[in-house]
Image (cartoon, grey):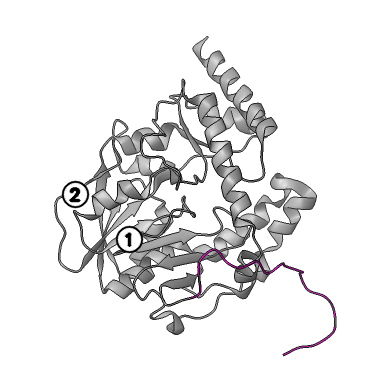
């Protein structure tokens, strides 16, 4: 134990969101969390939706997992007839707008289910399956994943510890020089994660996650999402409320409008949204639900950094662009 010398970060120890017990594993990334779940279940094959982050596919492929792809229907239910032996099924909580009731109905149809709650950090874990959560999609941390499920802590003592301090500087730089100027450093951190094997959560990430006001962030995100829904419900082609309930805390507001240039035009106004998984268009037909979402879904920010003023600014810009598109 070191005593004295310079002061480190002074982080209030309010406690992590998930408890410290045998049902919770702390790892470095959600893709590693999916693989860890497969290891616990002793499955060497998995069914994954086409509409999914490609980094999950590449990570699992490198680990020797056989991947089967499936399509969704318009209700976001998997179009999958049965499973091969020793296989798992990955279900994704898209955008964080799907309640546990939705998933419990699907769970009855499959065995060895893993729920990717990366976009839904606050959704309560469902018993009888593995629930994977991504910390960095909701909070200012360099990495981090929780896996919650039966004996999830098993095997974790076989993994090396992650170290994230060397690429965490982008979190500080954003405060001083902004998003654009710190983006390259942020991508250096992403590259580190992409090149990492399955690891235990770093001490830095765990310390940061132990000092977050989770209730405040939950309340702001839900309030912002509802406000955004009132703004866009008449133009959004996606029904975001059909499976939404009080347990849902979305990652962003998924606006679907058939406008190919919206993201680029918003970026010119310094409103950064990006796309979600355009690479999916290389695998599916454009008329599928997967192709439609990959092309037209715009993830509008509703996170804890913002309030009514910022949401109004975004809405004004979006509606102006859409109106010009009509003209």
Q: Which residue is mark 1?
A: 114
Q: Is residue 163 above or below residue 34?
A: below
Query: Residue 259 location in percent, x, y?
Result: 47, 24
Q: Is residue 18 magenta?
A: yes
Real-space CA distance between mark 2 and mark 1, rounded to the nearest whole angstrom: 15 Å
Taking depth in this image into account, of 78 and 187 the one nearest to the observer is 78
**Residue in the picture at 40% in, 58% down:** 56
Comes first in the chain, label 2 or label 1: 2
Residue drawn at x 39%, y 30% as measured from the top left: 238
Q: Is residue 201 left or right of residue 43?
A: right
Q: Are marks 2 and 1 in contact (CB under 8 Å)?
A: no
Left or right for 169, reference 82: right
Circle 2 residue: 80
Using the image, tell me which numbered label, if any, was put on residue 238.
none
Question: Can you give x and y, in whole percent of width and height, for residue 264 in the image?
Answer: 57, 31
Image quadrant where residue 68 sits = bottom left
- Looking at the rendered image, the quarter that the N terminus falls into is bottom right
From the viewer's side, name the closer residue of 241 and 326.
241
Looking at the magenta stretch, what is its main secondary structure? loop
Q: Position of residue 184 (x, y in %)?
A: 66, 53
Residue lying furthest right: 5
Residue 132 is inside the magenta segment: no
Residue 247 in picture, x, y percent from top left:
45, 48
Residue 77 visible, this angle? yes
The magenta-colored residue range is 1-20
**Residue at 64% across, 27% down:** 312
Task: Give the secondary structure at mark 2.
Answer: loop
Q: Would residue 60 be found to the left or right of residue 234 on screen?
A: left
Q: Residue at x 61, y 65 (%)?
A: 209
Q: Residue furthest bottom?
A: 1
Q: Secondary structure at mark 1?
A: strand
Q: Is residue 42 above or below residue 222?
A: below
């Amino acid at each position: 134990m070191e005593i004295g010398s310079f002061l480190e970060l002074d982080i209030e120890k309010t406690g992590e969101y998930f408890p410290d017990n045998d049902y919770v594993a702390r790892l470095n990334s959600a893709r590693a969390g999916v693989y860890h779940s497969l290891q616990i279940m002793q499955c060497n094959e998995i069914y994954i939706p086409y509409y999914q982050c490609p980094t999950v596919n590449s990570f699992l492929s490198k680990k020797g997992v056989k991947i089967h792809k499936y399509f969704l229907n318009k209700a976001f239910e998997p179009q999958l007839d049965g499973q091969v032996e020793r296989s798992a099924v990955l279900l994704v909580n898209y955008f964080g707008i799907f309640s546990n009731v939705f998933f419990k109905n699907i769970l009855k149809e499959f065995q060895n289910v893993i729920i990717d709650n990366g976009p839904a950090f606050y959704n309560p874990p469902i018993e009888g399956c593995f629930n994977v959560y991504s910390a960095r999609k909701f909070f200012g941390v360099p990495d981090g994943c929780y896996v919650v499920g039966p004996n999830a802590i098993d095997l974790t003592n076989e993994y090396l510890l992650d170290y994230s301090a060397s690429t965490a500087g982008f979190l500080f730089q954003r405060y001083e020089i902004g998003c654009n100027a710190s983006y390259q450093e942020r991508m250096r951190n992403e590259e580190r994660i992409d090149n990492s094997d399955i690891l235990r959560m770093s001490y830095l990430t765990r310390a940061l996650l132990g000092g977050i006001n989770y209730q405040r962030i939950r309340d702001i995100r839900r309030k912002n999402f509802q406000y955004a829904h009132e703004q866009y419900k008449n133009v959004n082609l996606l029904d975001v409320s059909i499976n939404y309930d009080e347990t849902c805390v979305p990652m962003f507001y998924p606006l679907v409008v058939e406008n190919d240039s919206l993201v680029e035009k918003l970026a010119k106004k310094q409103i950064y949204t990006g796309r979600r998984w355009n690479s999916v268009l290389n695998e599916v037909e454009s008329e599928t639900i997967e192709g439609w979402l990959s092309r037209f879904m715009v993830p509008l920010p509703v996170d804890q950094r913002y309030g009514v003023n910022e949401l109004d600014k975004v809405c004004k810009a979006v509606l102006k662009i859409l109106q010009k598109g009509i003209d």
